[in-house]
């Protein structure tokens, strides 16, 4: 099944996976891959991260949107841990002067976190679809 088809699957609340993550999709794209220069995608996270210390803290706090999304959808603890790891890794390496700024242009932690949330919601939607097809006993 294609990725687009999986995002069309319905969750138990009646919304498609695509509808459930639409806002987070736009947010993570804006932070990580909204712009392109010379074939390199980057977003607001890379630009804000250029401001020493405060930029990395601000982008780390913005990354918590992913955690809120995971909690709002009641995803498993493993998803929240994965998201926190991505945020912490991005903040830690991003804080290294100069090298961290280069790292921020290539590490797309917000898109990674989007894929974590999307993957768990697709699994939930697939389980829901399977439960609807199960014969009644």
Image (spheres, rainbow, N blue to C red):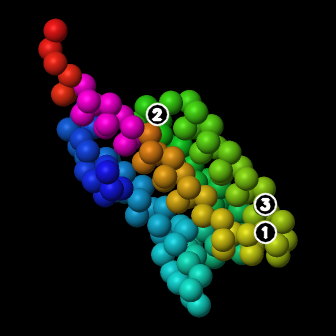
For the point 78% across and 69% down, which residue is it?
100
Regarding residue 16, the answer to whether it shows in the image is yes
Residue at the limit of the structure toward the top, as seen here: 137
Disc number for residue 93: 3
Quarter occupied by the C terminus: top left
Q: Left or right: 74 with respect to 125? A: right
Q: Left or right: 37 with respect to 98? A: left
For the point 33% across and 56% down, which residue is it?
2
Which residue, given by chain and number where applicable, does mark 2 sit on? 75
As measured in the structure, the alpha-carbon distance from the residue carrying label 1 to the one carrying label 2 is 30 Å
Q: Left or right: 115 with respect to 84? A: left
As measured in the structure, the alpha-carbon distance from the residue carrying label 3 to the one carrying label 1 is 5 Å
Read off the magenta span. 121-131
Q: Earlier in the sequence, mark 1 or mark 2?
A: 2
Question: Is 15 colored magenta in this rendering?
Answer: no
| Label 1–label 2 contact, CB within 8 A | no
Badge 3: few (under 14), some or many (20 or more) residues near its Cα, within 10 Å? some
Residue 96 point in image, percent of width and height: 84, 66
Q: Earlier in the sequence, mark 2 or mark 3?
A: 2
Q: Secondary structure at mark 2?
A: loop
For the point 82% across and 76% down, which residue is it?
98
Regarding residue 48, the answer to whether it shows in the image is no
Q: Earlier in the sequence, mark 3 or mark 1?
A: 3
Disc number for residue 100: 1
Numbered circles on residues, count: 3
| Label 2–label 3 contact, CB within 8 A | no
| Label 3–label 1 contact, CB within 8 A | yes
Above-or-below relation of 97 to 116: below
As measured in the structure, the alpha-carbon distance from the residue carrying label 2 to the one carrying label 3 is 27 Å
Residue 89 point in image, percent of width and height: 73, 53
Q: Secondary structure at mark 3?
A: helix
């Amino acid at each position: 099944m294609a990725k687009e088809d999986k995002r069309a699957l319905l969750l138990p609340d009646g919304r498609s996976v695509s509808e459930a993550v639409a806002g987070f999709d736009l947010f993570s794209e804006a932070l990580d891959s909204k712009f392109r220069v010379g074939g390199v995608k980057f977003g607001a996270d890379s630009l804000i991260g250029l401001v020493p210390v405060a930029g990395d803290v601000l982008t780390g706090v913005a990354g918590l949107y992913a955690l809120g999304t995971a909690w709002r959808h009641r995803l498993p603890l493993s998803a929240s841990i994965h998201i926190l790891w991505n945020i912490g890794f991005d903040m830690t390496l991003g804080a290294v002067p100069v090298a961290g700024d280069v790292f921020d242009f290539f590490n797309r932690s917000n898109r990674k976190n989007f894929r974590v949330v999307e993957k768990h919601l697709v699994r939930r939607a697939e389980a829901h679809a399977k439960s609807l097809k199960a014969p009644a006993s």
